Image: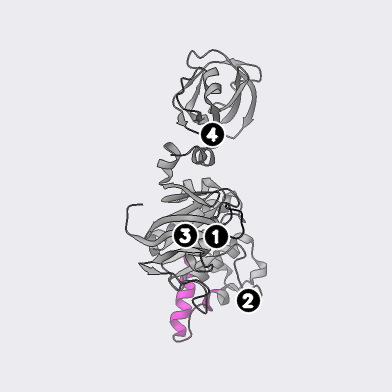
Amino acid sequence: MSEKPIISVQNLTKSYSADITSGVRDINLSIPEGKIISIVGESGSGKSTLMKLIYGLLAPDSGSVYYQEKKVLGPHEKLLPGHESMKMVTQDFNLNIYAKVYENISSMLPNTDLKAKREETEEMMEFLKIDHLANKRITELSGGEQQRVAIARAIITEPKVLLMDEPFSQVDALLKNELRTDIERLSKYLGITVIIVSHDPTDGLSLANEVVILRKARLQETGSPVDLYNNPKHLYTAQLLANCNILSRSEAGMLGLNVQKSEIALYPEWIKIGEGDTGPFTVKGTVFKGFYEELILEKNDVSIRALNVSPGTYQKDDEVSVSFNRFLEFDS
C-alpha cells in the first residue's frame, strides 16, 4: 500500500493464551485514506482482534496503532474506549430495539440545532434508502434493514474511518449486492475509509481496494484484489481466494505438467476442456452453477475441478482432452 496511510499498525501483537495462533502476532500494516480495506482469513485467524485493536477497544501486548501519526489509545488509557474519529458497526448492531429508526439515528446528534439535526437525519436515511422506515421500531425490521440503521448511526457523526465486523453475514445474496453498493457510495461520496472484516474472501475481491490476508494470527500478504488473485505470493492466498486445485509436484506430473516446485495451484478457469493433447480425462461428475458448471475430471487417480461455460455438454464417464493455460508454483 503505497499511498499516505491514515492508519499505521506497527509490530502489533495481542495474545489470548499460550496458543501462538490466537489473537495477532507482529502485524505491520498501512491503511490508505479513503479506501475500502477488506481483512479476510479463516475463523480464528485474528481478523476481529485486529479490527478491535485498530479501533482502540483492545490493548495490545506490544506494538502500536497510529491514526494520522498519533497513537491510538487503548481501553486502559482512556475512559471511553474507541477512537473519536472512528466508528464501528458490530454484528449485533447495538441499536435501541424499542425506539424508532429516526430516533436511533438522530440520537447520535446534539440538540444544539434541532432543525439541522432533523435535516441531517432525514438526509442520512435517504442516502441509505431507509427513509420509508423512519417511524418503524427496530423490532419490526429485517436484519438487513437493522444493519442500514446501524451504519446510518455510525456515519451521521462524520467519522473518518468506518469499521464493519462481518457486515454481510446476516443478509441474503440479493441484499448483499445492495449493501456492497451502499458501502462503495459511502467511501466514494463521503470520503470515509472503510475497513471490513469478512470470513468470505469473495467480499474482499468484489468490493475492496486492498485486501489483507491473515493466517494463524499473522499477516500473510496484502495487495489489490486483482494482484492477490492472479499473482499470490503464498499458496494459502491462492487457495483462500480462488478455491483452486492444489496438487503436489508428483500429482501435477501425472497430469502431464512440468513442475519445478513442490506444489501448484491450478485455477478451475485456467483449464480448457476439449483442447490439448494431455491424454483423456474422465468426467467423474458435474455440479450445476447456473450459467456454468463445474466438472470433476480424473486422470491417473488424480482429480481436478474445471469450469465449463456450456452446461450439459458433458456427461459422467465421458472422456475429454484438456489444456492448462496457466498454473502457479509454490515451495512448501
**Label 4 SS:** loop
Q: Nearer the viewer, residue 163 or 260?
A: 260
For label 3, the crowd category at 10 Å Cα-Cα, with few meaning under 14, some 14 to 19 and many 20 or more, is many
- Distance, label 4 to label 1, CA atoms, is 28 Å
Marking on residue 12:
3
Kindly indicate the quadrant of the structure image that contains residue 49. Answer: bottom right
Main SS category, magenta section:
helix
Marks 3 and 1, the one that precedes in the sequence: 3
Q: Is residue 184 visible?
A: yes
Q: Is residue 35 visible?
A: no
> Residue 177 appears at what percent x and percent y?
53, 51
Image side of residue 53 versus residue 19, left or right: left
- Distance, label 3 to label 1, CA atoms, is 11 Å
Marks 4 and 2, the one that precedes in the sequence: 2
Q: Amino acid at mark 2?
A: Ala
Say which residue appears at 53% left-offset and 46% top-offset: 201
Marking on residue 99:
2
Q: Amino acid at mark 4?
A: Cys
Which of the two marks, 3 or 1, is nearer to us in this view?
3
Contact, mark 4 vs mark 3 (Cβ under 8 Å): no
Q: Amino acid at mark 1?
A: Thr
Marks 2 and 1, the one that precedes in the sequence: 1
**Label 2 SS:** loop
Q: Which residue is mark 4?
A: 244
307 to 79, vertically: above or below: above
Which of the two marks, 4 or 2, is nearer to us in this view?
4
Marks 4 and 3, the one that precedes in the sequence: 3
Q: Nearer the viewer, residue 45 or 159?
A: 45
Is residue 69 magenta-colored? no
> Residue 218 appears at what percent x and percent y?
50, 51
- Distance, label 2 to label 1, CA atoms, is 31 Å
Q: Which residues are magenta?
A: 105-129
